[in-house]
Image: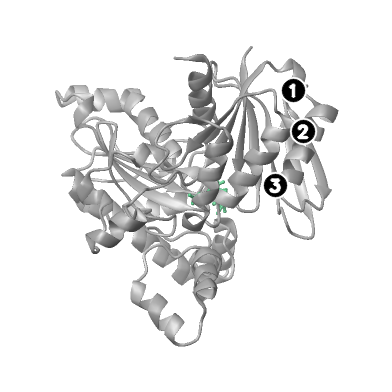
Amino acid sequence: MATVLVLNSGSSSLKYQLVDPESGRSVAGGIVERIGESTGSATHQSGDAETVRDSRVPDHGAALRLVLDLFDEVGPSLADAGITAVGHRVVHGGAVFTEPTLVDDDVVTAVRDLIPLAPLHNPAAVKGIEVARELLSHLPHVAVFDTAFFAPLPAAAATYALDRKVTAEHGIRRYGFHGTSHEFVSAAVAAHPAVAAKLAAEGRGPETLRQVVLHLGNGASASAVLGGRPVDTSMGFTPLEGLVMGTRPGDVDPGIVFHLVRTGMSASDVDTLLNKRSGLLGMSGVNDMREVRKLADTGDADARLALEVYLHRLRKYVGAYTAVLGGIDVLTFTAGVGENDHRIRSGVVRDLKFLGLAIDPAANEARSDEARVVSEGSGGAKPLVMVVPTNEELAIARQAMELVEGP
Ligand SMILES: Nc1ncnc2c1ncn2[C@@H]1O[C@H](COP(=O)(O)OP(=O)(O)O)[C@@H](O)[C@H]1O
Ligand SMILES: CC(=O)OP(=O)(O)O
Ligand SMILES: [Mg+2]
């Protein structure tokens, strides 16, 4: 068996998985949470066994050491796992990285140079890569970029209507993020039998398939995909733009930033406000959707409004992207909120009947780990609504393996 160890360094967590890219099987994996806080914890899964270890984890280097210790102590043994590469998720690849890339010192420097564009994400990736290259120095390391899938966005979608000298000087464009997920999920949708049947019934080829994908996790983004190619996405130059997120506001009037700076906030305070103190957290006091729900269900007015704002923004983007695509064939929900929260799904679709979108409540509320259709009726020209679990780790493992071993 050949495997890839995938590391996804988030702002305060390290998710990891040992994956067999060929079968798609996850051999072991887990998460180290609350990195940098007074108490951290690691949850390691190997087969059916789960091991939880609570301890302070000062940084991503310590987190990776803890993960390697867990593999040593509880297994499976990394030495016997046939690891052929370590795959690293890197959020911002800028204009430089549009393909999976073998990591060397220059790549680390270039990813570090991009930190100002993804201050929540790239520092953790740099740290993760540095420590992993030190501790697993015998293995090739491959960086897979969240921005890569969106590199071919049409110029009309990628270009900000700013002075072109400024955009050229600073590399300002819509980069888009969560690309590994949007690519994986939109490909899974295109390969689903219900979608193939719909296209066949309409006598259409796969190049005409019009998809809107909603990746709703802690960060959240929407994409419009035509025949497998991205034509628009909601995140922009940085992962701040677009949908309402756990701690980020998504779209805001840039005039608000100037007002706050002119009236006494520093640029760095505004940065913290927009990256860490806004979104669901800013509006309701909590950033985890399950907790927002709990508060809203007890009648908390702030949490209810936060949910309304969240849903309003989603409906707006689905409508906009349907216009961009000239119609919609499939609307897909993915990531933590999109896969698990059926009320968010029905809330988005409820007011979009005019697009032909309609949910089947029983299918929508049923729990499953499979890619599935949750819309009403089958056949006909109506668009499908789907839930497709994302698997960024598997996608990264496949890309890393392909780079190291060839296709
Ligand atoms: N059963 C659930 N119902 C509602 N939200 C959920 C559920 N399970 C997870 N979530 C939400 O998913 C989000 C995290 O999604 P995830 O894709 O893991 O994000 P990230 O990869 O950005 O950490 C959290 O806001 C969490 O509340
Ligand atoms: C780009 C981004 O927002 O990533 P995440 O959802 O992991 O925070
Ligand atoms: Mg995620």
> Vertically, is 233 above or below 241?
above
Query: The residue tagged with tag 2: helix, strand or loop?
Result: helix
- Asked whether residue 390 is in view, the answer is no
10 Å crowding of disc 3: few (<14), some (14-19), many (20+): many
Three-letter amino acid code at the position of disc 3: His
Q: CA distance from mark 1 to mark 2?
A: 8 Å
Image point (29%, 31%), residue name: 228
10 Å crowding of disc 1: few (<14), some (14-19), many (20+): some
- Circle nearer the N terminus (1, 2): 2
Three-letter amino acid code at the position of disc 2: Leu
- Which numbered tag is attached to residue 78? 1
Label 1 CB less than 8 angstroms from ligand 1:
no
Task: State the colouring used for the structure image.
Answer: one colour
Q: Are marks 1 and 2 in contact (CB under 8 Å)?
A: yes
Residue 372 quadrant: top left
| Closer-to-camera residue (59/231) | 59
- Asked whether residue 162 is in view, the answer is yes
What residue sits right under mark 2 in the picture? 68
Query: The residue tagged with tag 3: helix, strand or loop?
Result: helix
Image point (53%, 16%), residue name: 22
Task: Where is residue 79? Give x, y as percent.
Answer: 76, 19
- Which numbered tag is attached to residue 46? none
> Vertically, is 147 above or below 201?
below
Image point (25%, 60%), residue name: 165
> Vertically, is 227 above or below 150?
above
Query: The residue tagged with tag 1: helix, strand or loop?
Result: helix
| Closer-to-camera residue (81/342) | 81
Task: Where is residue 88? Give x, y as percent.
Answer: 57, 35
Three-letter amino acid code at the position of disc 1: Leu
Task: Where is residue 266? Give x, y as percent.
Answer: 52, 78
Question: Which quarter of the rendering shows the N terminus?
Answer: top right
- Which numbered tag is attached to residue 60? 3
